[in-house]
Amino acid sequence: VVFSPATIILRLSILVGRLLGVEADLLPDGRIATDELLFDIPLIVLSAFLVIRSGWPILKALWMQTINNRPLSQLDEMVFYQLFQPAGVNWVQYRTMLANGIIDWITPEAGQILQREEYQEEEAERRRVGRRRQQQDDDDDTTTSTTSTIIHHPESKYLYWLFEGVAILSYKGEILHQSRRTKGKSINDPAALGFLGDMQFLYALDKDTTDQYYRYPMPTIKVGSDTENDGVGSTSATTLMRIDTTKMIEMMEHDEQLTTSMRLLLLKSIQRKVGALLRTRASIGNGGDGDTDAPLKNQMRVQMMASSTTSTTTEEDDEKEEAQQPSSTVEAVINNNHQEEEAFV
């Protein structure tokens, strides 16, 4: 599918030109040679197919409410202006994403995990199995079928954007950042967090640029709740926009402008995420305000103090051992001298 208006106009012009050519052959005597007809019909069918293939997604997007029973909500419009438009995604492309089920909204339960660190290990194991099969099988078709899946784990193929609620990022048991939203933030806002799960999507985009698989660290993403973080019995739900990255990549393969815009959007997302992590670390260090809530800051500060206390205790024990080592050495030398004197006598 090609979403470029210029491509659609070009294909439509080719179709009209072929139809006019057939009409020109019919005008003189109302008849057309069989060989010309056999030559023109396949070309007309192919041209019509390409026009329909290019135009249908756009028509489906423009009349989405009638065709797909998917009304455009105020939330959809807000996300377009906050997230996609700043990166260069146009309105038709965004409507096409909605119409084709690339974008939807979810309200997960508090405590639900959207992405685990273990997914990366599972992906690495699948890649190793795929390479072993590739070495054992000489059939190109079979080889392609074993390694063509872009993202294997079902939960890891989604990209998330937090609109409302709480999301917690952690790695190796340590909480890195918590983001709380009452409404979404623009991707250009320095206080924004960006996408959740963008590292896996970036790997999927760049998988064809290298023959070797590298395992990049990815955090665990968990949906939090106001109750577990501040002790207040709030029942506000967490709302996230979810992007099916497999379908998104398929759409990007036929739209270079969309590919450029999505890469820019991912770059902005990583910039916002780095800024959020720096603010979180600074707020823990100086006790100032940041995006991280006070209860989470206290929890992270306790973790850091605990690790610091452990390292301090270890250093003190090492110093004691070092202080004891000289005295033990002196005693050994004295005993050795006594033994030598007794032997001499």
Image (tube, grey):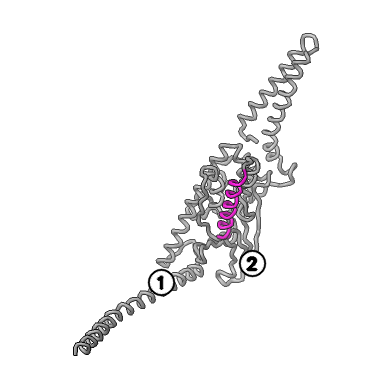
Residue furthest left as drawn: 345
Q: Position of residue 152 (x, y in %)?
A: 62, 52
Q: Position of residue 173 (x, y in %)?
A: 52, 66
Q: Quote the CA–CA distance across marks 1 and 2.
A: 36 Å
Q: Position of residue 122 (x, y in %)?
A: 59, 57
Residue at the (64%, 30%) spot, across then down: 8
Label 2 sits on residue: 235
Residue at the (55%, 69%) spot, across then down: 229
- Which span is picked out in magenta? 116-137
Q: What number is the disc on residue 93?
A: none
Q: Position of residue 13 (x, y in %)?
A: 66, 23
**Tally of numbered discs:** 2
Q: Considering the image in quadrants, where does the N terminus appear?
A: top right
Q: Is residue 277 magenta?
A: no
**Nearer to me, 144 or 184:** 144
Residue at the (50%, 66%) spot, across then down: 174
Horizontally, residue 284 falls left or right of residue 51, namely left
User: Mark 1 or mark 2: which is in front?
Assistant: 1
Q: What number is the disc on residue 308?
A: 1
Q: Is residue 120 magenta?
A: yes
Disc 1 marks which amino acid? Ser
Q: Residues within 10 Å of mark 2 (few under 14, many from 20)?
A: few
Residue 86 seen in this snapshot: no
**Nearer to me, 335 or 188:** 335
Asked which quadrant contains residue 239, the reply is: bottom right
Residue at the (43%, 71%) spot, across then down: 307
Q: Is residue 286 above or below residue 144?
A: below
